Amino acid sequence: MKNKAAQSKAWKTVQIARHPQRPQFLDYANELFDDLDVLHGDRVFGDDGAMIGGLARFEGQPVMIVGQHRGRTTRERLQHNFGMANPEGYRKSQRLLDLAERFNLPVLTFIDTMGAYPGVGAEERGQAEAIATSLAQLSRLKVPVIATVLGEGGSGGALGIGVADRVIMLSHSIYSVISPEGCASILWKTAEKAEQASEALALTAEKLQSMGIVETVIDEGEGAHLQPENVMNKLREVLKTTLAELETMDADTRCEARYQRLMKFGSSNLGLAS
């Protein structure tokens, strides 16, 4: 009975994370940042609407922000490819991160995607290589990097902008190597077991924090779609505090700490709290 209750709670979190009225990246960007100047294109193939980023000011401080935007209406979802980035999206983010490094700007990334786009064209243009390069680039950046999971953090598509000094999650967001439906289809040969898979994946903010994968969880009550202003204000305060903490560290020390943070994943030092 206990397992069934926990399972239902995880599945409920999945549904809230996917709620159609849940605030998305551009909602947060317009509320939290000033003077946002969106930059376009990867200088190789084209511009990807799923990955948006540019220069902005956070509490008066210049920063670089990058995030995935899904869209709400059919037109917007098509424009932003449902938040599933192509390789040019990750290469655009790489270009923006290079600018951040050059001008010593902190990087704030915002995750909300089912995963990277799995189409044939994306694979032909080097989807796996683009994500791998993004992981390597974020791992070695000398500037502070903070990642925030706003809704659904799915697979390598999320990890492509998820390597950071600190990871923040909203309490009803999810972060997983695969969707519950995808996991269920592999393990049980049917997506109908998605609710059971959601518990097995340990994809909730609470569990990920207990495992040391996430540093901060922001309580959003019954859901950010019900009280967006309150949640955004909480996120603002956490970002301010976290950024101030990271900026007191020497760049080499911060980069080494980020490396060590990544290296403990999967080791005996990382375990689900009892």
Image: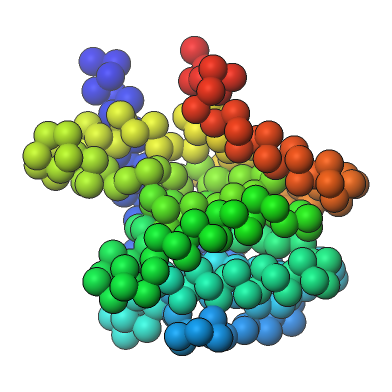
Q: In the figure, is residue 91 to the left or right of 181?
A: right
Q: In the figure, is residue 178 to the left or right of 187?
A: right
Residue plotted at (59% across, 50% down): 163
Residue plotted at (9% across, 39% down): 189
Tell which residue pokes out farthest to the left in this image. 189
Tell which residue pokes out farthest to the top in this image. 274
Q: In the figure, is residue 200 to the left or right of 42?
A: left
Residue plotted at (67% across, 68% down): 97
Is residue 150 at all visible to an observer of this figure? Answer: no
Q: How many marks?
A: 0
Q: Position of residue 9 (x, y in %)?
A: 34, 33
Q: Position of residue 166 (x, y in %)?
A: 67, 44
> As rendered, which of 214 and 16 lies closer to the eye?
214
| Residue 217, above or below 49 | above
> As rendered, which of 262 and 213 lies closer to the eye?
262
> As rendered, which of 117 and 150 lies closer to the eye?
117
> As rendered, which of 215 and 115 lies closer to the eye?
115
Q: Position of residue 42 (x, y in %)?
A: 54, 81
Residue plotted at (70% across, 53% down): 140
| Residue 52, above or below 12 | below
Q: Position of residue 198 (x, y in %)?
A: 29, 36
Quarter holding the N terminus? top left
Is residue 239 at all visible to an observer of this figure? Answer: yes
| Residue 202, above or below 94 | above
